[in-house]
Amino acid sequence: MSIALPAQKPLKSVAELVTVGLLPAAAADGLAPVAAQFAIGVSPAMAAIMRASGEDGPVRRQFIPDRRELTILPSELHDPIGDETHSPLPGLVHRYPDRVLFKLVSVCPVYCRFCFRREMVGPDGDGAMSEAQIEAAAAYVEARPAIREVILTGGDPFMLAARRVRQLMERLNGIAHLDVIRWHTRVPVVAPERLTAEFVAAVSGSDKIVVVGVHCNHADELGPEAEAAIRLLRRAGVSLVSQTVLLKGINDTLPALETLMRAFLRLGIRPYYLHHGDLAKGTSHFRTSLAEGLDLVEALRGRLSGLAQPIYVLDLPGGAGKVPVTRALIAEGGARNWTGDWHAYPPAGAGG
């Protein structure tokens, strides 16, 4: 099956967004400081959805820059989930005993306005791991039998060429104690044309369990080309799970979340994580309160089967890891992580 989109280029500046009619010319000067601080990127697929849906909508709000991004709260951090705290080698994050992250690249096909790595990604971001750094990371895993899973992230690792994906999979496939290779990506949804037969074969070419975490926040993102790309991965034997961020004004309603989870299930994507918005700089206008998020997740239980229930999680600032959002966490203003250590969190969730 071939996947075709109009021959267009990604939009990477305020001026380009104005030229194609996704921003009014009058907004350009006011958004210059936003563009100077945070990367801009809108893929052809997402631009087409925006143009079809009119002046505003849940897709547009995720990718079009906004002056509210210049409001940075004292609690917002450069590295809100503490990657750097757990990075023994360049590009490698080892937060939990049995799994590691490889941050392979710093580029993405789109730049989400709420991204928790927003100051590390983009053309001026942290850069890609070199071949030597990837080999060092693989050797680190090879020397530690307790590591059973490698998570490939970025940036977006599906921005790699098929050749480099194939080389990486061959290297990881040779590590005997490794069970799972997991990719985290937005590409199947926002740039589905990248999923050629060669690329899908490279991603799925392993004797390990291969999992692709598909990041999607609203059902409107799932156009026909995205659905076709997702089916290519599924038919290749790849296990698919979802990654969704709870976002105010985008998916913070019961109908929006229900429709999205049903779409995932229909496409063979197992709903996995619903992330509470991280304390990334300039993102407070996207964050709901923890109580609002928990109300939505509890309401989903009466409307969707267990197969379609995401886990609502919070990444504790500073690198302490993920915890499920519970009424106790909200009432007590914090939670114990997997090591048993107590970590406070702003009780309101949204602003503090």
Image: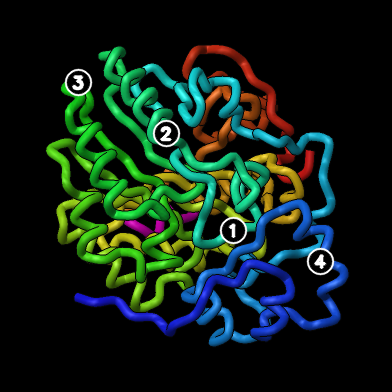
Of marks 2 and 1, which one's residue comes earlier in the chain?
A: 2
What crowding class fits label 2: few (fewer than 14 Cα within 10 Å), some (14-19), or many (20 or more)? many
Q: Are marks 1 and 4 in contact (CB under 8 Å)?
A: no
Residue holding disc 2: 102
What is the spatial separation of the Cα atoms under label 2 and label 1, in whole angstroms? 19 Å
What is the spatial separation of the Cα atoms under label 3 and label 4, in whole angstroms? 49 Å
Q: Which residue lies at the image location 87% right of the left edge and 68% below the top edge?
A: 30
Answer left or right for 169 relative to 281: left
- Which residue type does callout 3 highlight? His
Q: Which corner quadrant holds the C terminus?
A: top right
Task: Tell me which colouring the rendered structure shows.
Answer: rainbow
Instruction: Identify the magenta region.
Output: 299-306
Of marks 3 and 4, which one's residue comes earlier in the chain?
A: 4
Q: Does residue 286 appear in this view?
A: yes
Q: Are marks 3 and 4 in contact (CB under 8 Å)?
A: no
Of marks 2 and 3, which one's residue comes earlier in the chain?
A: 2
- Which residue type does callout 4 highlight? Leu
Residue holding disc 1: 111
What is the spatial separation of the Cα atoms under label 4 and label 2, in whole angstroms? 33 Å
Q: Residue furthest left?
A: 207
Residue holding disc 4: 31
Q: Indicate yes or no whether the magenta region holds residue 301.
A: yes
Q: Residue 160 versus residue 116: which sits nearer the camera?
A: 160
Which circle, 2 or 3, is nearer the viewer? Answer: 2
What is the spatial separation of the Cα atoms under label 2 and label 3, in whole angstroms? 17 Å
User: Residue 269, how many percent across, how many down?
Assistant: 30, 56
